[in-house]
Each structure stands twice: as structure tokens, then as C-alpha cells.
Image: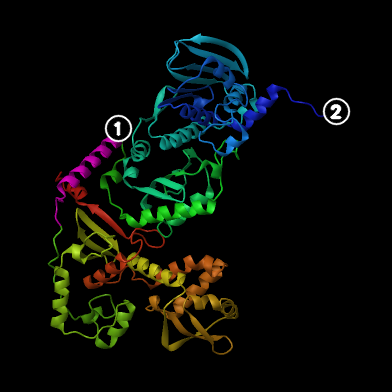
Amino acid sequence: MGKIQLLPEEVINKIAAGEVVERPASIVKELIENSLDAGATEIIVELEKAGKALLRVTDNGEGMDKEDAHKALERHATSKIRSADDLFSIHTLGFRGEALASIAAVSQLSLTTQQEDKIEGYCIAAIGGQIVSKDSVAAEQGTIIEVKDLFFNTPARKKFLKSDAIELRHCVDVILRYALSNPLTGFRLRHDGEELLHAPSVGEVRERIASLFGAELARDCLPVVSEEAGICIKGYIAKPQQARKDKSKQMLFVNKRWVRNEYVTKAVADAYHSLLPVHQHPVFFLALELDPQAIDVNIHPQKTEVKIEQAEQVCQAVHRAVRDTLEKHNLIPTVDIASEELAFSARKNIEIVHQKEAHHQKQRKVTGVAKYVLEPTQQTVLQVKDARRAGSYGEEAAVPEKNKEELKLRLSLPVTPAESDAAAEEKKQNEMRQEPEKRSSPHGKLPPLKLLGQAHKTFFVAETHGGIVFIDQHVVQERVLYERFMEQFMNKAVAVQRLLQGEVLDVSPAESLLMQEKQEELEQLGFALEPFGKRSYVLKTIPTVFGKVQPKELLHDVLATLEEQQNSLEQAQEVIITRMACRASVKAGDEVSIPQMEKLLAELEQCVLPYTCPHGRAIIIKLPVEELEKKFKRR
């Protein structure tokens, strides 16, 4: 007698259940998918002990007749596909016909269903996959599937379940995902008799985001809409200030199916390049509509992964869509004092705040007039000569003539022929009297500003429509220098400044070897070196953008970075250019005059993304006048 035997049907079902039914959340996922495929507009999930004791899913879908109810509990019985060819044109969430049979094999399951045109419904019950009862019953249209005592006949699997809190969290995550991708369907979750989640049917995904994650996040979400070469991308991405340390709020859907795809996720993260702090991840809710024949969803038992035929093309489209959205929206964060001091007491309060915000926005659109109108500045810039300010970031008139050229270079200001004091003063006054709208860049990325001055030698303070803004002087110039040099570097056209007298560098044997090894990379960055003795080099050129930094310090910083990274220049360029920009920028504690502030902000407005430094820190923060009124009890 041979050793190979056919396994009994009962064993086969339990093996299949091990692939499909990992935990209660797996059952919730499969049943919700069936409900959505049945056209349900209302889905209720009820749990006891996180689904270990009881898991019930009720929907108002089309229901089943008696024959289909019986077939539904058999393996590989499905209405979604007919042949192998259908696997490559799937338009539904479920298709294998394994879920109900696998769930029934490891639990006590009952299925009650009622069709719209039938007088009575039908109920069938199974224990361990074996049907124990069936009968006609009175029921409402739709289907109710009840799962009790999960893994009662597989105790080894049952003991590997986590605590109730962890298992419940997995169930909530599943419901959140499908609630986001199906805003027209209402969802409820009850646990041990308490309602944990209620997401009523809404017409727009942003409203669903507000009801699930709060009005604050919904307000900071930017719409993404793009379609190219059969790739349709819709959804929302959050502003950089909403970034998280985890990826729990990264939702990706392909043809309404929640999936994991590290390549598409990375494309989104890359689009936020230089906008996020280190180890922070963007928040996004994106839905991709792709040709079903161009994807394969049949590669994972739980259907959470898909294989995309033209993955590179899709990733590029996602990257462009997200980047374009970030570039055309205002990313300036707004300080909300009330929300920082008080947590929202209930979800109803969130909805009220959201409704009020929508009402205020509607009123502002109708009137078009702000409560406090921004007026042009009347500030007079005095030309005061003060020897104590020589060498600081003060007015140029305070600097001795012999140091003016050096100071202008340090400030990256263009050297222009000297003007008479009267002419210079008249020119400055004319510029300052211009309307803020006229002084703003045609790009319109920054709001019109009336500069008030410098605070703590660190922040610019300015008035704008509807509030006050605070601007970090260091990160303003850091973003400007970063983008300017990055553009030159990527175009292989780094502008260099030849030093009148080369800087001699005496280096250690190790540094000498490093400089020889990285000579080509250094030249690409704008540093030209010539040997000058055994272990000495002469630095001939430096990048023009960073010309005001001490050449030796800048070069040593670049060498240290190249040594730390142990990578090619292409891989290390981001760190190097970011550090160079940081070192060359004005620092906290440096005095900056209003004309110099104007110049820095004009340069900032020419940037592609003038909202954060390359490390992801905010450049500008707005304090709304409404918050000031609250603090002073004016409202």
C-alpha cells in the first residue's frame, strides 16, 4: 500500500482555514468584502471579546436564495468568476469562494439571508463545517452571518491569538480601511454592547476622514486628482505638519481594495522629499483605479498584496500627482491654541467644529472681506551708523566701507554701485509703500506680508491677512540655498567661485587618501583641489552659492559626510547638500534688517516648496487673529 493518501474533507477545510482565517480581523475583512460585493449600503459589525466569543456582520445587500446559501458554505463556490481567464479581470473584492467554508470549518457559524422579492428568508447553521440545521425564517433584506466560539476545534491556533485589546484594534483597522474606500456605505462597530465606531454614509471622502480621524486632519488634507495613461489617482494627502512616526494612517487602495505595496508607498514618501522631519512618515489616503487586466490580486491568501504589471509607470504617476499637489497648495501651518490646550471631548464636537469651519469658509467666500484688513507698512528704515553693529546682520550703512564688500558676500547680497543716501532712502520708502499684494511674488506661494521686525534675533514677525506669522530666519535661507544648489547640481552646472588666494589645507594621511579617492565627487560639488606638497592641498574653487562660509570648514564638512555615508555621491548628495545649506545660512542670534528680510523672503518665494527646511522643519507658522481674540476675551 502506498504512503500517499487523500486527506479527508474536514482536514482540507482546516488547512484552508489556516491560510484565510488568521484572527477575528480576517473574518471581519472577508465578510465586509462579501457585503460590499452584494451592494450593501449599511454594514454593522458586532463583537464580543474582540470577536473570539461572537462576531456578527449584518448588511442590507441583495441577499441569497436557499440554493446559494447552501453553496456558499462549500469550498470554491463563488458567483464572482467562471473560468481561469476571469482571474485577470476581477472587478469584485471577493472571488475565490473559500472564505465562508474556511470560517465555518473552525467555528460555529449561522447564515441568515433574505432577498428583496422573497416572502421569507432562510437560515442555515454549521458547526466545524458540518451543517446542523436549516430552515425558513422571517428576516429583513440582506444577510446576517454570525460566528461563535472561533477556533473551538483547533485549540493550538486559538492560544496564539493576542489579547482582546490587540485583536479588537486589528478589527477596527479593517473597518476603517473599508469605510474610507466606500464613503457611500454606512459602517457601525459595536463591542460588548458599546458602539465604538459610527461612520454614516457621506458623499465625500474628506467628510469620512473627518468622522473617523477628526476635523483637524481633514482640514489639513489636500485633494489629489490625476489621470494619465489609464492610471487614475484620487484621494487626499495630508500637509507635512500632520506627519506621523508610524505608518498607521497610510491607506492605499487599488480598485477599491486595500493593499500593501512598498513601491507605491515609497513613491508617495519620495514626493514629500525635504518636507518631512527625519523618521516621520506622510499621511495619505489614495485610491488607484487601474485596468484589472494589468494587476494580479491572486498572489496572497488574504488578498492584501497585488502585483502591478507596469509598476514603475504607476509609481512615477503617483509621485508626480503627489508632488504637484504639494507644490500648488499653501503648506503654512496654522497655530490652533484651543486645540493644543484642550482635547476634543467627543466625536460630536469634532463634527460641530467641522460644520462651523465649513460655515465660516462659506461666509468668507460670500463676503470676500477679512475682518482685519492688512495695510501697507508705514515703517521708516533709519540709516544709523553704529560701530557696535559692524560685522553683524544690521544695516549696511553701519558697516565701515572697507568691510562692506565682505559683508555683502557673507549675506549673499549682490554688490551694486554705491547710491546716495537720499536716493537709497527714497527707493526703500517707495518699495515699502507698495501694496503687499504687489510686493508678493507672481507665484503666490507666500501670503502678502507686512514685516514688523525681528524677535529674539531668530524670528521674523509679520502681519498678514487674518493673523500674524512667525518666520524662522535660519530655515528661510537654508531652503533657498538648498534648492538653488540642488538645481545646479542636478543639472551638472554648479556655479563656482575662484578664490583670489587659494586656501592651503594640511591633512592627515587618512584624509589625504580620502581626498584622492573622492576627488571626482568633490569637483562635481564645486571644490577644485591641487596637490601642494606631500600631504597638502590648495583649494582653488568653492560653490558660489555657499561662498560666505569659510572654505576650509565647508570642505572638511563635505569630506566628513562622504566618509560617514560610505556611499556614492548620488546616494550621499542629499545629506551633503543639506549640511552645506545649513552651515551657510544665517543663524539664530544674527541681526537681520528689514530690507534683508525682504530680500530673503523674495528669494524664498521663488522656491518650489517654500514651507519647510530640507530637514522638514516649518519655515512659517501662522497665528490666526481669532486665536488672539480668544486669548484677550474679545470673543
Q: Please tell me in which quadrant of the rendered image residue 447 appears.
A: bottom left
Q: Position of residue 141 (x, y in %)?
A: 43, 18
Circle nearer the viewer, 1 or 2: 2
Residue 163 numbered tag: none
Judged left or right of residue 558, residue 393 is left
- Give the magenta-colored segment's residue range: 348-373
Question: In this orientation, which residue lies closer to the viewer: 425 or 84?
Answer: 84
Between the C-alphas of marks 1 and 2, the distance is: 68 Å
Please indicate, yes or no, whether residue 266 appears anywhere in the rendered image: no
Q: Is residue 336 above or below residue 452?
A: above
Q: Secondary structure at mark 2?
A: loop
Tag 1 and tag 2, C-beta contact below 8 Å: no
Asked if the magenta segment contains residue 355, the reply would be: yes
- Reading the image, the residue beneath label 2 is 2
Please indicate, yes or no, whether residue 229 appears anywhere in the rendered image: yes
Farthest residue to the right: give it.
1
Q: Position of residue 476 (x, y in %)?
A: 32, 65
Judged left or right of residue 77, residue 419 is left
Query: Label 1 neighbourhood size at 10 Å, few (<14), some (14-19), many (20+)?
Result: few
Question: In this orientation, which residue lies closer to the viewer: 75 or 265?
Answer: 75
- Reading the image, the residue beneath label 1 is 348
Dominant SS type (magenta): helix
Asked if the magenta segment contains residue 562, the reply would be: no
Q: Amino acid at mark 1?
A: Lys
Q: Secondary structure at mark 1?
A: helix
Q: Is residue 57 above or below residue 346?
A: above
Closer to the chain start, of discs 1 and 2, is 2
Query: Label 2 neighbourhood size at 10 Å, few (<14), some (14-19), many (20+)?
Result: few
Which residue is found at the position 42% from the left and 86% from the top? 499
Which residue is found at the position 52% from the left and 41% from the top? 292
Which residue is found at the position 14% from the left and 46% from the top? 634
Q: Position of residue 5 (x, y in %)?
A: 79, 26
